[in-house]
Image: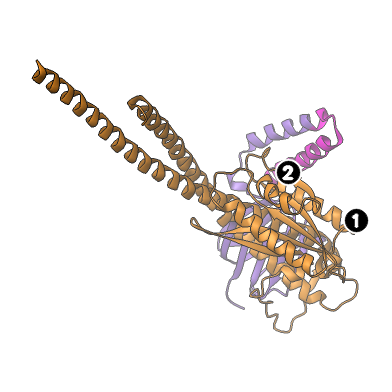
Chain colours: A purple, B orange
Amino acid sequence: MTGKLQFSLVSPEKELFSGEVDGVDVPGEEGDFGVLPNHAPVMTTIRPGTITIRNGNETQRMFLRGGFADVTPDGLIILAEEAVDLAELDAGKIAQDLRNAEENARDADTDEKRETANARLEYVRGLNDALGG
Amino acid sequence: MASLKEFRDRIDSVKSIQKITKAMQMVAAAKLRRAQEAVEAARPYAARMSAVVGNLSSAMDGRPGAPELLVGTGKADTHLLVVASADRGLCGGFNSQIARHARAEASGLIKDGKTVKILCVGVKAADQIKRVYPDQIIDIISLREHKNIDSTIAAKIAARILELFEAGEFDVCTLVFSRFKSVISQIPTAQTLIPAKDGLDDDIGVPDLGGAAYDYEPDEEDILKILLPRNLTTQIFQALLENVAGEMGAKMSAMDNSTRNAGEMIDKLSLQYNRKRQSMITTELIEIIAGAEAV
């Protein structure tokens, strides 16, 4: 069992990652799972969380806000609704965003606004947790 | 014959028009570059999405209980045409091309005895379609309030389409937009959105699983329930991005043409102006000389 895993991570706005890696840990809807080369074909939905891309001694962590993972013999494709590289994030800014989001959620006066504010809050909270953990 | 002053005024006004078209061309060029990057960045997602849907649809093939979004309602009586165009003019034949394509599509369907409903995204094509099919248009969604095309607009349009579909308002949904091929070439395209399996590109091969069975978590139906609306949003988003890039490309070449035309006009007017001026000087000279000789 040699070889590498062909992995691509795409979000609607852009392709975030494409290349060969040793393995990827994915937060599946029904439990986390690791994908190594020659994984059996699986398709699953993803819950908001962090994926870990392992390549040699390097690891890269990215935060996803839901999406799909598709494992085929050709490799792993993750279609993320939204994805950010954790290395590019700034803890201070996220904490500030979190406070803003909490405030917005409190101040929302219509149902529609409340819904968007809450979705945003949940997302930022997830980011904050991912960064802390 | 016009006086010299009139000539000067006309030359000035053409010059200021030329300045405006030149500025618009440069703005379009800058926007085009950004739009082009956005389209190219979004293409992998849309392509992967189609691959995943194609993959699932082949797994669901022939099985009962497949979602109607994927396999259709089993009828094809009522068609919904979603016509995506730009919200602004001054971009050459861009909007007319889309409108013409949509009209051809609609008239073909009507000839076949189908009911056609039209949902317009972007007001420019709507204006042209309204003249021919005023009763078929069910709604017009303007993009004007959105400065940048992002996926929330696409999601809104997709939600609207899903709502109509669930209410049984139509059986087949086709999206008409302009595929951005290059700056000078945009191709009006019709793409089937619902049923989703008819809209898949034929060249997306189903991956060879080598005999292994696909595992679905949760099961196929649950995944499809989430995936298909997402796919709809993605396809619409992609179409909107292609449109923006196409619009900017068309605008750029249209404004380039206008600038050149204005330049030609200025040359022509200047020539006429100079001739006129010279002939006036000549006339004056003749008068002076004739006067001097008479003395």
Q: Amino acid at mark 1?
A: Ala
In the image, residue A129 lies in the stretch drawn in magenta? yes
Tell me if mark 2 has few (under 14), some (14-19) or many (20+) residues whose alpha carbon lies within 10 angstroms of its own: few
Q: Position of residue A72 (x, y in %)?
A: 69, 73
Q: Please report the residue visible at 62 percent of the width from the left and 78 percent of the height from the top.
A: A1
Subunit of mark 1? B
Quarter of the image for residue B269 reads top left
The circle drawn on residue B167 is 1
Q: Name the residue beneath numbered marker 2.
A: A129
Q: Nearer the viewer, residue B83 or B181?
A: B83
The circle drawn on residue B159 is none
> How far apart are the two marked residues, 1 and 2, measured between alpha carbons?
41 Å
Q: Nearer the viewer, residue A31 or B205?
A: B205
Tag 1, which secondary structure? loop
Q: Position of residue B88 (x, y in %)?
A: 61, 43
Does A35 appear above or below B27?
A: below
Q: Position of residue B75 (x, y in %)?
A: 87, 70
Quarter of the image for residue A26 reads bottom right
Quarter of the image for residue B238 reads bottom right
B37 lies left or right of B3: right
Subunit of mark 2? A
On whether disc 1 and disc 2 are found on a single subunit, the reply is: no
A47 lies left or right of B261: right
In the image, residue A106 lies in the stretch drawn in magenta? yes
Q: Is residue A10 visible?
A: no
- Find the magenta span and give its range: A105-133
Q: Nearer the viewer, residue B51 or B12?
A: B12
A84 lies left or right of A116: left
